[in-house]
Image (spheres, grey):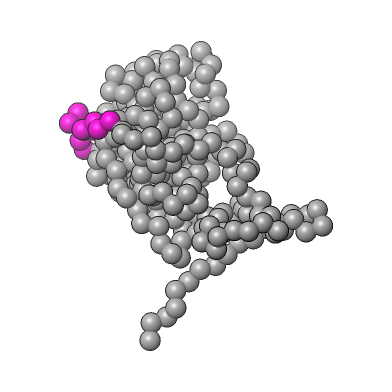
Amino acid sequence: MRVVCFCNNWLGWQGLQWLRQQGEDVAAVVVHPPGRAKYADEIQAVASEAGAVVIDGSQLRGPEVVECIRSLKADIGVSILFGYILREPVLEIFPRGCVNLHPALLPFNRGANPNVWSMVEKTPAGVTLHYVDKGVDTGDVIAQEEVAVLATDTGASLYKRLERAGLKLLQDAWPSIRSGTAQRKPQTGAGTLHKVRDLEGLDEIFLERSYRAEDLLNLLRARTFAPHAGAYFRDHGRKVYVRVELFEEEKS
């Protein structure tokens, strides 16, 4: 199929590279601009090998960019950890729709930072491949897989395991998408939704406030993800950041 890939981060790079290895015709790669891009060099290298057009994702609402994508006559859009919300008229360009790989067990943790909220709110974690509609991570589910949150997990370790589970999910489900036989299962239940700015009200620890031990530990480990600063308390007006290390006792 002729594909436009919207991607960022390790999983975006790996997913894009895998699609190329399957012989898919990557017409364009839509990326994050400098400052927001991760694994930019690796993604750019794959795009160059494919002879794909590289598009700045922050300009997707511009009519010239929309017409550029339309002119490529791609069959399908594939979004992988892409940080901009895809809307019409971009979505209506693709005859076979647009699919998104989201590192959450939808309908839980739509939106940003699902690895954090799975720990903080004790909601199920996982990965979901779904069709993109007008909402935020609300489209019909193609496939999903739950990922257990371990007692030793931090935000970083859970994120890495979600990325790897997501890559496998894409690889397993892609043949059905390619053949047009992928099932579509509407999402049910209210689920949860978080925006990037929701972390601003989460990170500060108030030293004179009472916390349940489990809740405080979940917050600290969820926000342990270098190089992100994470949770903090204030000492004489200055922020002091906290990271934790968790490990199990060795079996005798």
In the rendered image, which quarter contains the C terminus?
bottom left
Residue at the far bottom in the pictured view: 252
Residue at the far front in the pictured view: 210
Task: Using the image as rendered, state which of residue 77 and residue 55 is in the foreground.
Answer: 77
Across and down, in percent, residue 20 comes to 33, 38
In the image, is residue 237 above or below residue 32? below
In the image, is residue 205 above or below residue 185? below
Task: Using the image as rendered, state which of residue 147 and residue 198 is in the foreground.
Answer: 198
Which residue: 42% across, 26% down?
Answer: 135
In the rendered image, which quarter contains the N terminus?
top left
Across and down, in percent, residue 123 comes to 41, 49
Where, by quadrant of the figure, is residue 199 drawn?
Answer: top right
Instruction: Please say whether residue 181 is one of the residues in the magenta stretch.
Output: yes
Where, by quadrant of the figure, is residue 239 drawn?
Answer: bottom right
Which residue: 24% across, 44% down?
Answer: 172
Asked if residue 11 shows in the view, the reply is yes
Q: Left of 161 or right of it: where is 2? A: left
Which residue: 48% across, 28% down?
Answer: 85
Instruction: Please say whether residue 11 is one of the residues in the magenta stretch.
Output: no
Across and down, in percent, residue 175 comes to 21, 38
Number of numbered discs on residues: 0
Across and down, in percent, residue 228 comes to 61, 51
Q: Which residues are magenta?
A: 175-186
Which residue: 55% across, 60% down?
Answer: 212
Task: Using the image as rendered, state which of residue 53 and residue 142 is in the foreground.
Answer: 142
Task: Using the image as rendered, state which of residue 36 and residue 2 is in the foreground.
Answer: 36
Asked if residue 77 shows in the view, the reply is no
Q: Left of 99 or right of it: where is 86? A: right
